[in-house]
Amino acid sequence: MINKEKGMKKFGMTGTCLAMALAVGLGACSSKAATATSDDAATADAATDTDATAGTDTTAGTDALATDMSGDVTSAAKLASIARGKYLIDAVFACGVCHTPKGADGKPDMTKYLAGSTSYAFPMPDGTTNIVNAENITPHAEQGIGTWTDVQIANGIRKGVDDQDVAFWPIMPYPEYALLNDLDVQAMVDYLRTIPAVDNVVPSDTVEPPPGVLAAASAKDSDIPHTTLASTDPLFAAAERGRYLATGACIQCHTPEVSPGIANFKMAYAGGRQHKATADAKIATSTNITPDATGLAGWTIADIVASIKGNTDKAKNPLCDASPMGHGWMGDMTDGDMTDIATYIHTLPPIKNGPFTCYTK
Ligand code: HEC
Ligand code: HEC
């Protein structure tokens, strides 16, 4: 978004909406029009709920949050949802890689947990570098998302729009998060409500996402490759569970782009995606993790699990600092989830691409 120094009047709303209306053929920009895509037009009403009553509204479609229990913070179900959300945010999807700033020691500054920003710099097609700031997603009322409803937060995660319908850059992996299920998104919302509110101002972005970005962005389930295992294979179920997790956790960084933040899913997991963690960082390139000779051919499922756990390569050498595995991030997943992901990665359709080196300069 353009103006994320909260408390200031947001700039860009009219321009963005107008441009998107032209690009995606929508007539107006009132309420949720700019966010409506063909598959969720029927949900526009649910999206305007002032509180997350969508869970009781069976017509709410993709905006329905399955476990809404507004005001309920003590039931066993709510506590389980919060715990699930913490696990997804801290370990599986490692939201803090982008949303928690790093201290001088290079480790996440936990006094600013999820309070933004790691500036995220990426090359534009015209050769310039765009810097997008990952927002403060703590419950702080002015600087964070404390005043957002559950549905608004869910829409931020899965649809890439803020509480005023301004579109985000798909550097925020909402195109892939679009495929997360309602329970998991509700869990993340529930957890985000429980973390300390941090008064941290995140600088404004300077470049607006291109018109029509939302229409281009959302991944479809059919975009994501399946395991090559037969459905009768004893490992099939594990691989498909891994597919769900890897869609949120791994695919974005390991897939080349058609435009900034938008993956070329025909090359899913074939690596070569470039990004800089900050404007002055070196350009990091992800590796091909399909089982091709240019990727992970020769790795076992156990090798991949060890890599996730330790943030190491097959020979146990540390990976570059742009890789978010290991203890503190994705290496804190359960052994079961790491094995499911590794089973999936190990049985992907092989794609020839690369090999790549993380830092070439
Ligand atoms: C690759 C980096 C990255 C990751 C990983 C990431 N985000 Fe983001 N997120 C961003 C950026 C960048 C923005 C701002 C985009 C913009 O301003 O156009 C953002 C914006 C948001 C917003 C909107 C906040 C606001 O005030 O507008 C929410 C909510 C959010 N992210 C939640 C999450 C959650 C939850 C996760 C993990 C499941 C996550 N993000 C993972 C980069 C990331
Ligand atoms: C923030 C971007 C990012 C995300 C998210 C990410 N990776 Fe990576 N990954 C990288 C980069 C960059 C490298 C290259 C590291 C190097 O070469 O030192 C890498 C390297 C790897 C390697 C080592 C490959 C080799 O040839 O040595 C494996 C295995 C891997 N990633 C698997 C995964 C899995 C599985 C996930 C999801 C659980 C994941 N990655 C999520 C950026 C990412």
Image: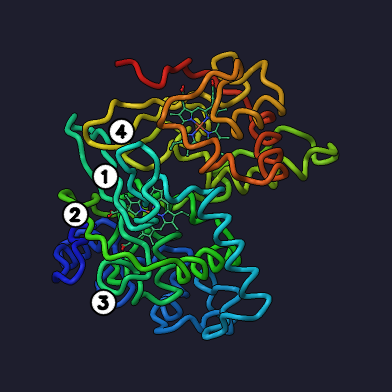
* Horizontal side of residue 324 vs 14, given as left or right: right
Quadrant where the C terminus sits is top left
Please give the residue where the numbered disc 4 appears in the rendered image: 276
Location of ligand 1 given as a quarter of the image: bottom left
Please give the residue where the numbered disc 2 appears in the rendered image: 203
Residue drawn at 23 percent across, 33 percent down: 125
| Front residue of this view, candidates 140 and 7 | 140
Tag 4: amino acid: Lys
* N-term-proximal mark, 4 vs 3: 3
Q: Are marks 1 and 2 in contact (CB under 8 Å)?
A: yes
Q: Secondary structure at mark 4?
A: loop
* Horizontal side of residue 192 vs 311, given as left or right: left
Please give the residue where the numbered disc 1 appears in the rendered image: 119
Disc 3 and disc 1: Cα gap in Å?
Answer: 31 Å
Q: Is residue 54 above or below residue 41?
A: below
Quadrant where the N terminus sits is bottom left
Disc 1 and disc 2: Cα gap in Å?
Answer: 9 Å
* N-term-proximal mark, 3 vs 1: 3
Tag 2: amino acid: Pro
Tag 1: amino acid: Ser
Residue drawn at 33 percent across, 58 percent down: 115
| Front residue of this view, candidates 255 and 20 | 255
* Horizontal side of residue 240 vs 327, given as left or right: right
* N-term-proximal mark, 1 vs 4: 1
* N-term-proximal mark, 1 vs 2: 1
Q: Quadrant of residue 307?
A: top right
Disc 4 and disc 2: Cα gap in Å?
Answer: 18 Å
Q: Secondary structure at mark 1?
A: strand
Please give the residue where the numbered disc 3 appears in the rendered image: 30
Q: Position of residue 232 (x, y in %)?
A: 85, 40
Q: Position of residue 358 (x, y in %)?
A: 41, 21
